[in-house]
Amino acid sequence: MRPHVYIAILALFAVAGCSTPAHHWTPTVSPRAEDWHGPYSLLLRYDANNDGVVTRRELEAGLRQDFRQADTNHDGLLDMDEVRAANLRRIRIDQSTAIPLIDWNGDGYVDFGEFASGMRSLFEQYDADGDGNVTLDEMHIRLQKVSPGAQPPDANAGGSH
């Protein structure tokens, strides 16, 4: 081979050696401390008075506000363009935990019941004692069941509605 080929190969190895190694999951390494958007963050957004408790009333009021915001033509139904826009907004805000809107009955629109069904279901899962309130303790209990070792939600993270 020619000397310039050897130099090119050595330069390639040098550049490759300087690159950041790929991070692979391993059980011996602690997870990164990122601002992960867990399902509890979805509910905590509806804590209107920031007391660390999401009541059914707060949830419903927040869902109605979200629905009115998504219903840009104010006809009481979300057409497919409004659904698409709402889903994109949810993904932007909630990232991987976004609950997509789905036209469950196939009528071409998403009504308020379909709009609220995902969050209502999540609320029911977290309301361990069935009292119509989701507390930080209940969120922590549920979080520990699905993700042992995870940190509980921050009481100051809610209240966007």
Image: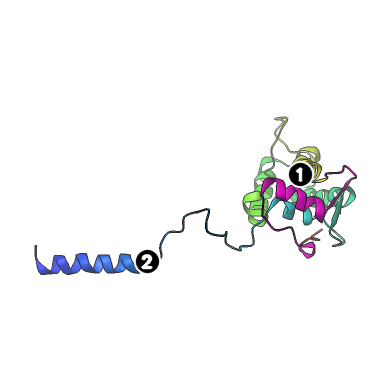
Marks counted in the figure total 2
Residue name at image x 70 percent, y 58 percent: 151
Residue 117 percent coordinates (x, y): 77, 39
Q: Amino acid at mark 1?
A: Leu
Count residues near mark 2 (Cα–Cα under 10 Å), then give few for <14, some for 14-19, many for 20+.
few
The image's colour scheme reads rainbow
Q: Is residue 158 magenta?
A: no
| Label 1: element kind | helix
**Circle 2 SS class:** loop
User: Where does the image place residue 62, in percent across and percent down from the top left?
Assistant: 83, 52
Q: Position of residue 27 (x, y in %)?
A: 53, 53
Is residue 69 visible in the rendered image? The answer is no
Dot 1 alpha-carbon crowd within 10 angstroms: few under 14, some 14 to 19, many 20 or more: some
Earlier-in-chain disc, 1 versus 2: 2
Residue projecting furthest to the left = 1
Residue that appears at 46% across and 58% down: 23
Q: Is residue 26 left or right of residue 4?
A: right
Residue 9 place in picture, x, y as percent: 20, 64
**Residue ID at (71%, 50%):** 144
Quarter holding residue 14: bottom left
Q: Which residues are magenta?
A: 128-157
Instruction: Name the one closer to the observer, 24 or 26.
Output: 26
Residue 51 horizontal side relative to residue 22, left or right: right
Q: Which residue is identified by label 1?
A: 122
Residue placed most toward the observer, 160 or 106? 160
Q: Is residue 4 left or right of residue 129?
A: left
Q: Is residue 33 above or below residue 107?
A: below
- For mark 2, what is the residue? 19
If the image is split into quadrants, where does the N terminus sit? bottom left
